[in-house]
């Protein structure tokens, strides 16, 4: 539920309101300037204008400078002269020599009204020019220049008063050597050149000065409500009148005291006080407009401060303070609380530092609108605990310089309990009702505006559906519950059902939205996994184990949290088996789902293998190695990869065999045969005459197969060669004679050379 809290400050806390921020930038004096864009006014540089009195400046609705004028020339925001922006018909020494007002029917066009000065014997009267800001790429151009308004000779007093219809404006001047006020109405159709004339008050004539016309000097200002008019006559009195901003009529003349040189005038933002300056008397005077009769008001005049230089123009600022021009001084004076009576108005001579620039005696001749009360409100949503609470303050009226501060009534939140700005947010530390205070402060008002209201932070339901993931065995279910909730609580499950419990039988994501009577909703969720019983296998139904070996039984990888129980009560994930028997295990998954697996283990004997003792032999003949008697189906593997049941060893070396039984059991043995240094004989005569005696070249005491043999005839021609000799060469096909032999043992590298005689 959205709550809107609004408070309107009326009574005496009223403020001058300028049209948005059109009065944000003041340019005046000797290239001086002030910006009101921030919290406090600051000096700005760049002004191209050096003027003694006459000046006016205007900004757009966002507070960006548009242009400024000395009543003679007009400069754009880049501080360069506008096209056609010279000789506007005014005079830089006229008190209120220039005033700017926007065209009622064209937001891009502005009127510049100017009057002449005593220095020129007031000959020029009232003139106007028109600036069109749509020209020159938004920099503006004077499209109509120095149009004479039929007014006759007028004083240096020129002011703008908003019309009661909220659209038009009154352009007010005062006739010279007369007591006539001339009010020209500016409408959507342009300037009405026939003025509303009011003959009231003193005749403005004479005075000192070089031309004996100094009584034309001084200011004329309207009150913020547009119902009063004040005039300063340099060598005469201050004057007070009533003004009807609906008809343009001036009435009810109240002469006020004379303070030597009556120059600047300005009303306080709430219209309760009138201020005037004593030009070369350096003093600031306050009149209490609430004193009662005209005589009482006149008698209330009192000096409330003294300026550093000549006391010049008075002008209310966007911040509700009144600023005072001080001749040839690098500071603007300031009346900090102009609504206050007497010295409580707090006048300060060094109010705004102008940097290296100097003030003269004029300030921008800005007009005031009717009083708008300061209105503040704030909105907030009743929120549920845990959510960020947004606040939105709305401030209207006032000067546009108001600031908003907040106290959320939540000290437990620490430094976050306070905030500034129009749109803060706050996270309350606990459910409950909090007293939230919005304070709106603005320069020029003594007591800040406060709004205090209760903001409810509703509790949220507490719901717990259990662990983030819940597992249940296949064929079973899990009951999800929101628990006990207060009366008025509503429940809605993911399928739209509204019971306080939900039975989940399938895998999936389940959630529930629980809403309490205050409208606060919380969502709880859980994932349900339906788990099938484990799939188990310990291997083949019958497994053989070789005697003396072991077998590790395992059901394979299972989820974390799985438990095991073997037939012997052990609980490890595996079981090491060394003997025959039937083995079984029960496996239980975390949700409690179980399954059993079993296997029969048989123990088989290993083969008995014996190749004999290591032996040193005269290896004239190969030695047959046997692995011993083995069951049918056994397999053999000798050291050279051969697979026969026996092996013929013809050279010295290490011989081994690996026997695998039909059950897969393996046994191994090896034997080392060493060659003994035995006597041998190589024949030097053979007689291959078929008498079966000495028929072939036979090596005695050597294993012929271990030797390679090459034979050459007497001429060195090779007649025979073999890599493994077999004692059979009988010179077949060769003639009798002498033959040379070379015997080589490739294993040992031994060689024998000699000759043999063949005789048949």
Image (cartoon, rainbow, N blue to C red):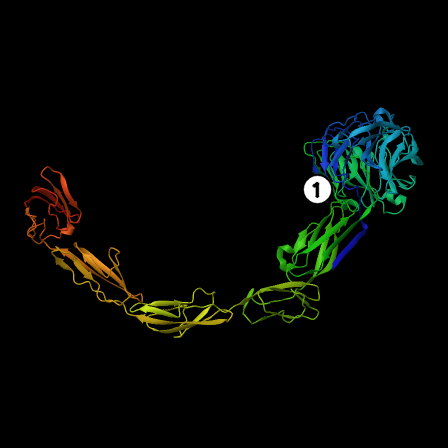
Q: Position of residue 58 (x, y in %)?
A: 77, 35
Given residues 745 and 162, the one toward you in this image is: 745
Q: Is 577 situated above or below 647?
A: below
Q: Residue at x 29, y 68 (%)?
A: 548
Left or right of 293, for residue 17: left
Left or right of 629, for residue 432: right
As helix, strand or loop, the secondary structure at mark 1 comes to: loop
Given residues 530 and 688, the one toward you in this image is: 688
Return the residue at label 1: 40
In the picture, residue 294 is in which quadrant?
top right
Q: Residue at x 91, y 42 (%)?
A: 246
The quadrant of the image that shows the N terminus is: bottom right
Left or right of 237, for residue 588: left
Q: Is 331 situated above or below 540?
A: above
Left or right of 322, for residue 751: left
Q: How many marks?
A: 1
Q: Position of residue 177 (x, y in %)?
A: 91, 30
Q: Position of residue 480 (x, y in %)?
A: 60, 69
Q: Position of residue 566 (x, y in %)?
A: 41, 73
Q: Is 275 situated above or below 455?
A: above
**Can residue 468 be spotted in the picture?**
yes
The outermost residue toward the front is: 690
């Amino acid at each position: 539920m959205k709550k809107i809290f609004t408070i309107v400050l009326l009574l005496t806390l009223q403020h001058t309101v300028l049209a948005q921020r059109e009065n944000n930038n003041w340019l005046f004096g000797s290239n001086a300037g002030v910006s009101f864009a921030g919290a406090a006014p600051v000096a700005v540089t760049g002004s191209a204008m050096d003027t003694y009195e006459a000046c006016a400046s205007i900004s757009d609705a966002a507070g960006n400078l548009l242009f400024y004028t000395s009543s003679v020339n007009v400069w754009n925001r880049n501080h360069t002269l506008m096209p056609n922006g010279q000789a506007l018909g005014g005079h830089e020494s006229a008190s209120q020599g220039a005033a700017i007002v926007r065209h009622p029917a064209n937001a891009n066009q502005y009127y510049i009204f100017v009057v002449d000065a005593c220095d020129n014997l007031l000959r020029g009267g009232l003139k106007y020019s028109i600036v069109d800001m749509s020209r020159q790429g938004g920099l503006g151009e004077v499209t109509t220049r120095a149009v004479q308004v039929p007014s006759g000779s007028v004083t240096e007093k020129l002011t703008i008063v908003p019309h009661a219809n909220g659209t038009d404006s009154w352009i007010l001047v005062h006739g010279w050597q007369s007591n006539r006020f001339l009010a020209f109405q500016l409408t959507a159709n342009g300037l009405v050149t026939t003025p509303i004339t009011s003959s009231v008050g003193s005749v403005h004539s004479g005075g000192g000065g070089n031309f004996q016309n100094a009584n034309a000097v001084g200011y004329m200002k309207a009150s913020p409500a547009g119902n009063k008019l004040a005039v300063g006559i340099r060598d005469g009195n201050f004057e007070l009148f009533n003004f009807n901003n609906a008809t343009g009529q001036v009435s009810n003349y109240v002469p006020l005291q004379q303070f030597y040189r009556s120059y600047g005038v300005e009303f306080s933002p709430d219209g309760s006080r009138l201020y005037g300056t004593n030009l070369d008397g350096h003093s600031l005077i306050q009149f209490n407009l609430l004193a009662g009769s005209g005589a009482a008001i006149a008698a209330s005049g009192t000096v409330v401060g003294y300026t550093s230089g000549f006391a010049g123009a008075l002008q209310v600022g966007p911040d509700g303070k009144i600023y005072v021009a001080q001749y040839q001084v690098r500071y603007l004076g300031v009346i900090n609380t102009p609504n206050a009576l007497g010295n409580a108005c707090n006048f300060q001579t060094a109010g705004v530092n102008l940097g290296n620039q100097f003030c003269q005696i004029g300030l921008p001749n800005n007009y005031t609108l009717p009083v708008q009360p300061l209105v503040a409100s704030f909105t907030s949503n009743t929120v549920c605990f845990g959510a960020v609470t947004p606040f939105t303050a709305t401030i209207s009226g006032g000067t546009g310089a108001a600031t908003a501060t907040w106290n959320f009534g939540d000290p437990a939140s620490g430094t976050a309990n306070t905030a500034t700005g129009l749109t803060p947010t706050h996270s309350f530390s606990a459910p409950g009702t909090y007293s939230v205070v919005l304070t709106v402060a603005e320069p020029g008002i003594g007591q800040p505006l406060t709004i205090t209201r209760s903001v409810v932070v509703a509790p949220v339901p507490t719901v717990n559906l259990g662990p983030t993931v819940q597992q249940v065995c296949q064929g079973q279910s899990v009951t999800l519950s929101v628990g006990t909730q207060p009366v008025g609580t509503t429940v809605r499950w993911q399928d739209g059902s509204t019971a306080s419990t939900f039975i989940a039988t399938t895998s999936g994501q389940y959630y529930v939205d629980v809403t309490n009577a205050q409208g606060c909703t919380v969502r709880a969720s859980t994932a349900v996994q339906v788990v099938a019983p484990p799939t188990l296998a310990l291997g083949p139904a019958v497994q053989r184990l070789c005697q003396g070996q072991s077998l590790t039984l395992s059901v394979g990888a299972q989820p974390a949290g799985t438990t095991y129980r073997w037939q012997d009560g052990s609980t490890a994930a595996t079981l090491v088996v060394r003997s025959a028997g039937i083995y079984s295990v029960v496996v239980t998954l975390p949700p409690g789902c179980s399954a059993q697996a079993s296997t029969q283990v048989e123990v088989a004997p290993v083969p008995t293998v014996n190749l004999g003792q290591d032996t040193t032999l005269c290896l004239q003949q190969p030695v047959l190695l046997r692995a011993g008697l083995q069951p049918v189906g056994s397999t053999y593997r000798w050291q050279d990869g051969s697979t026969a049941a026996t092996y013929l060893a013809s050279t010295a070396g290490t011989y081994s065999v690996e026997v695998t039984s039909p059950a897969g059991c393996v046994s191994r043995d090896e034997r080392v045969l060493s060659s003994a240094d035995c006597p041998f004989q190589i024949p030097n005569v053979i007689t291959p005459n078929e008498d079966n005696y000495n028929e072939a070249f036979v090596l005695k005491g050597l294993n012929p197969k271990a030797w390679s043999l090459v034979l050459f005839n007497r001429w060195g021609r090779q007649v025979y060669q073999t890599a493994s000799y077999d004692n059979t060469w009988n010179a077949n096909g060769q003639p009798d004679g002498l033959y040379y032999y070379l015997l080589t043992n490739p294993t040992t590298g031994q060689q024998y050379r000699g000759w043999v005689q063949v005789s048949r």
